Image (tube, rainbow, N blue to C red):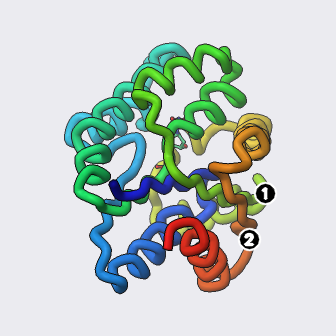
């Protein structure tokens, strides 16, 4: 059995950069690594990603949004993550079930107990071995997002256009989930320089798995 590590945090906390750096360290040790993301990671999941993230004229009901994220997750686990773990690979996933609890639960205000049940259903009760929370203030997250939007002329997605209160609720939601799951979570300040953060993450990961 391989091991399963997820990365969580507000937008622009640097999750994908840290996943890339961690994957490189594992690969240098000769380990096979699957890097994937949510929503997405499978052909079906990538279609769901497009559906749920793109700004559209019609309103997406909160219930629909919750089910779409869960559908993408159920597929990704069965099609890619479980087979990779069976083969002994390291799986690094950019966002996972805790994002549903933070965004749809804490920020949208949907029922947390129901979300927990839905997550269990999609996960078949196989939770990640380790979750790395990259914590960042909402101010810093907004400032980084602004820079990216200016530099790339990209459009904001359905979550990026949400206001400060929504993103504060997401951040506090993640901190609360981490507090409730101290054995699974390790929290880092995402305001640190990239390489310093990568070293800290590597120490935590090697302590746990190597
Ligand atoms: P990202 O891949 O750029 O992080 O964007 C994914 C967006 O979707 C992000 O704003 C968080 C949101 N999201 C949820 O609201 N619920 C979920 O379960 C997941 C996986 C993501």
- Mark 2 packing: few (<14 Cα in 10 Å), some, or many (20+)? some
At x 44%, y 54%, the residue is 4
Image quarter for residue 148? bottom right
Image quarter for residue 2? bottom left
Residue 191 marker: 2
Figure check: 159 above or below 148: above
The quadrant the N terminus occupies is: bottom left
Rendered location of residue 51, percent (x, y): 35, 30
Figure check: 78 above or below 140: above
Q: Are marks 1 and 2 in contact (CB under 8 Å)?
A: yes
Rendered location of residue 140, percent (x, y): 75, 62
- How many numbered discs? 2
At x 29%, y 60%, the residue is 88
Q: Judging from the image, what secondary structure is the residue with disc 1 in?
A: loop
Rendered location of residue 39, percent (x, y): 40, 40
Residue 137 marker: 1
Q: Is residue 10 visible?
A: no
- Mark 1 packing: few (<14 Cα in 10 Å), some, or many (20+)? some
Left or right, residue 81 beside residue 183: left
At x 54%, y 55%, the residue is 7
At x 41%, y 36%, the residue is 54
Residue 157 marker: none
Q: Nearer the viewer, residue 30 or 172?
A: 30
Image quarter for residue 36? bottom left
Left or right, residue 16 beside residue 103: left
Sooner in the amino-acid sequence: mark 1 or mark 2:
1
Q: Nearer the viewer, residue 85 or 98?
A: 85
Rendered location of residue 150, percent (x, y): 55, 65
Ligand 1 within 8 angstroms of badge 1 C-beta: no
Q: Judging from the image, what secondary structure is the residue with disc 2 in?
A: loop
């Amino acid at each position: 059995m391989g091991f399963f590590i997820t990365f969580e945090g507000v937008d622009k906390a640097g999750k994908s950069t840290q996943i890339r750096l961690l994957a490189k360290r594992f690969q240098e040790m000769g380990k096979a690594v699957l890097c994937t993301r949510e929503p997405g990671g499978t052909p079906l999941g990538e279609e769901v990603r497009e559906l749920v993230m793109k700004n559209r004229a019609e309103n997406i009901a909160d219930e629909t949004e919750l089910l779409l994220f869960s559908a993408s997750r159920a597929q990704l686990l069965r099609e890619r993550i479980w087979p990779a773990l069976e083969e002994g690979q390291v799986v690094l996933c950019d966002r996972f079930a805790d994002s549903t609890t933070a965004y749809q639960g804490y920020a949208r205000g949907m029922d947390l107990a129901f979300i927990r049940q839905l997550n269990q259903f999609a996960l078949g009760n196989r939770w990640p071995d380790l979750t790395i929370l990259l914590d960042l203030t909402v101010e810093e997250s907004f400032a980084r997002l602004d820079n990216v939007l200016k530099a790339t002329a990209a459009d904001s997605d359905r979550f990026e256009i949400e206001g400060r209160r929504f993103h504060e609720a997401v951040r506090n939601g993640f901190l609360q989930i981490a507090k409730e799951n101290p054995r699974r979570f390790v929290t880092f300040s995402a305001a640190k320089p990239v390489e310093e953060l990568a070293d800290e993450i590597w120490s935590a990961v090697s302590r746990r798995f190597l």
